[in-house]
Amino acid sequence: MAKTMPKFKGKLVMGANGRTNPLVWLVAIICTVIAVAVVLVGVAVFIGYMVIHPRVPVISVTNAHLDLFRNDYAGLLQTQLTIIVTAKNGNAKAHATFSGITFNISYQGQDIAVLVADPFEVPKNSSKDLSYVVQSSSIPLSPDQMEEVGNAWKKNEVEFDFKGAARTQWRVGPLGSLKFLCHLDCDLKFQPFNGTYIPSRCTSKSH
């Protein structure tokens, strides 16, 4: 014999006089106001983004030169490099601040130098160059590393590892203040015979 499931009916909260409880109307009004506010904020953020079109500031190696690259039979390497790092702010309506700037340059796993810079501000739609002259003390090389140096001379191409990071912050109108961490990880290549920098893309990625 089939059983009939009980039916439940929703019941509006009523007052003693048969009218809707004022508390229900109050909750409904509050929910409506919140929904409208969320929509308006979303529209404002979208319009602000389309009008301002914010761009994340970046750091890049824009030029470099190998001033010295010399090794001897004792397995000691001496080197000196000039590196130009450019901090670029592509925003047309906001200044950007760069801080926590640290770079590390190494050769075949041997650290050569740590490069830093004090916090600074880049005006809207502008850039600032950081010029570093890196001179190493005599770097002891293993037999395998000495062989790599020999190959670099033969190919007329030597490679250095360049890694670093910087914090960026800028205010984007109604969107508020935005913060990103820029990471830089690339290889700097040179011709050791004349020190010429072999251009390659070396631009930060933001997180």
Image (cartoon, helix red, strand yellow):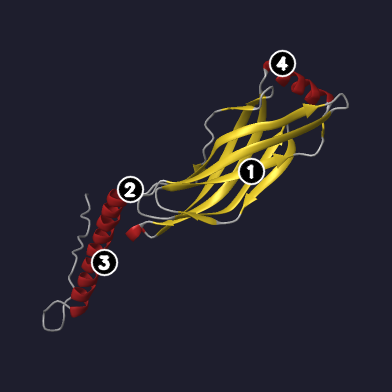
- Read off the residue under disc 3: 34
Mark 3 or 2, closer to the camera: 2
Disc sitting over residue 168 in the figure:
none
Q: Position of residue 50 (x, y in %)?
A: 28, 49
N-terminal of the pair, mark 2 or mark 1, is 2
Marks 3 and 2 in Cβ contact (< 8 Å): no
How far apart, in angstroms, are the residues tagged by discs 4 and 2?
Answer: 49 Å
Q: Nearer the viewer, residue 48 or 156?
A: 156
Circle 2 residue: 53
Can you give x and y, in whole percent of width and height, for residue 144 in the image? 80, 23
Identify the residue at horizontal 37%, vertical 56% (top origin). 172
Disc 3 element? helix
Mark 4: which secondary structure?
helix
- Amino acid residing under circle 1: Tyr
SS at mark 1 in the image? strand
Q: Which residue is mark 1?
A: 132
User: What whole-number distance in Å separates the C-alpha atoms at marks 2 and 1?
Assistant: 33 Å
